[in-house]
Structure formats: C-alpha cells, structure tokens
Image (tube, rainbow, N blue to C red):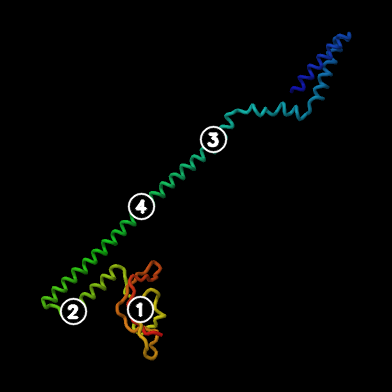
Amino acid sequence: MLNWIMSVVCAAVLAALGKVFGLPTEWNLIAGFVIWLLLGLAMSSAGDFARDVSEPEEDSRPVAETTTMAEPAEVSTQALHVAVAELSNQLRQKEKEAAHLHNQLSEREFRRSLSRLASISETLYFTLKLRTDGKLTDEQALEQLRMEIESAISDLGLEISSIIPGAAVSELPAGSFVVVKAEENPPAGKAGTVKEVISYGFYAKDENGKPHFISPSKITVYKL
C-alpha cells in the first residue's frame, strides 16, 4: 500500500512539472493518471498487493487470542497436579490402613500365643495335682502333658518334624536337625545314618508350602 501512495506523490510532482512547461490541463490529468498507474504497478507486485489487502499485520492480532490458546494447557497442568496430589493422599491412607491391620493381626497372634501358653501351664498344674492325689499314674500324667503340648503346637500353626532312626543324614532337609553326637565304628550299612532322635523339631509352612524350621531336631548319627 505504501508503494501506491508514493506513486501518487510522484505523479503529482510530474503533473506539476507539466503545468510549468505549459501543457494543457487535460493532458496533465491524463499524464498524471497514467504515471500513477505505471509507477504503482512497477513499485508493487501482485503478491504484495494481495498481502496488503488480505492479510492483517501480525501485530494487529488481538492479545486475547493468544491468552485464550494458552488457557487449556495451563488448566490441564493444574488438573494433573491436583490428580497426582489426590492419588498420593489415597496411597498414604491405604498404607496407614494396611499398617494398622498388620499391627492388629500381629497383636492378635501374640495374644493367641500367650493364651495357649497359659493353657499349657494350667494343664501342667492340674495334671500334677491329679498325680499328687493318686488319680493318675506317672505314665498317664506324662501322656496327658504330651497330648496338651502337641495340641498347642498344632494350634500355633507349627508341625512336628519326624526324623526316623536309620534315615540317611544326607537326605534330611537342610536346617531340620542338629547333630549332638557322632558315633564312630558304625555297624555294617549304618554309616552316615541317624542313630537316635533325642528330640523332635518344629517347623511352619509358608504360603508356598515350603517348611521353615523353628526348632531343629536333636539327633545322634553314625559317622561315614
């Protein structure tokens, strides 16, 4: 657009010069118009004219448009922060609930163990009283205590590890026994086997059924 304005100025100047040189007014107007048209076309291209007419200047775009385009991204970021914060709060709450339940279960198991231990003690004193009163023999009193102890072991989720004399020591589960004594000069075919079980061990199974020995069996063996 600036090129066309400049062409008007140049045409007016040339027309004034024509008047100075004594040209008729009609010829001055015609010459001024032709000069303006030719200079405008020469100083401007079609693309420049199209851009002048159709495209607004970059600076003329409303500021509000830029602000409106930036708002969705800002809102999305804020919503993401809120969602992450809410999720973190929920996870912390779940952790607290899980820890509380774990403490309750541990306390309940501990109380159950103490209650069963108290029951064994009551059975012991009651059996001793019956034996003192002559209502039980020694064998009956011992059998009564043995049954009570085995029942308590079962109630606590433990199992008895039964090792049979004569079993090969190499075939026993790791951690299931402790060798108290090893006998030399074993009988024929007895080398490396269990001679005697002094006391039985106890174990508990995990969720996969694998035994974990709480107390190993005490045994004597024949040396290889």
Q: State the mark number for residue 97.
A: 4
- Between marks 1 and 4, how big is the CA–CA gap? 46 Å
Q: Is residue 61 left or right of residue 159?
A: right
Disc 3/disc 1 C-alpha distance (Å): 78 Å
Q: Amino acid at mark 1?
A: Val
* Residue type marked 3: Glu
Amino acid under label 4?
A: Glu
Please state which of the two labelled residues, at mark 2 or mark 1, is closer to the viewer. 1
Most extreme residue toward the left is 133
Amino acid type at mark 2: Gln
**Where is residue 201, by image quadrant?**
bottom left
Residue 207 position in % (x across, y down)? 39, 66
Element on which disc 2 rests: helix
As helix, strand or loop, the secondary structure at mark 1 comes to strand
The residue under the point 72% across, 26% down is 52
Q: Residue at x 78, y 26 (%)?
A: 44
Of circles 3 and 1, the one toward us is 1
Mark closest to the chain's N terminus, 3 or 2:
3
* Residue that label 1 marks: 179
Specify the label residue 71 is tagged with. Answer: 3
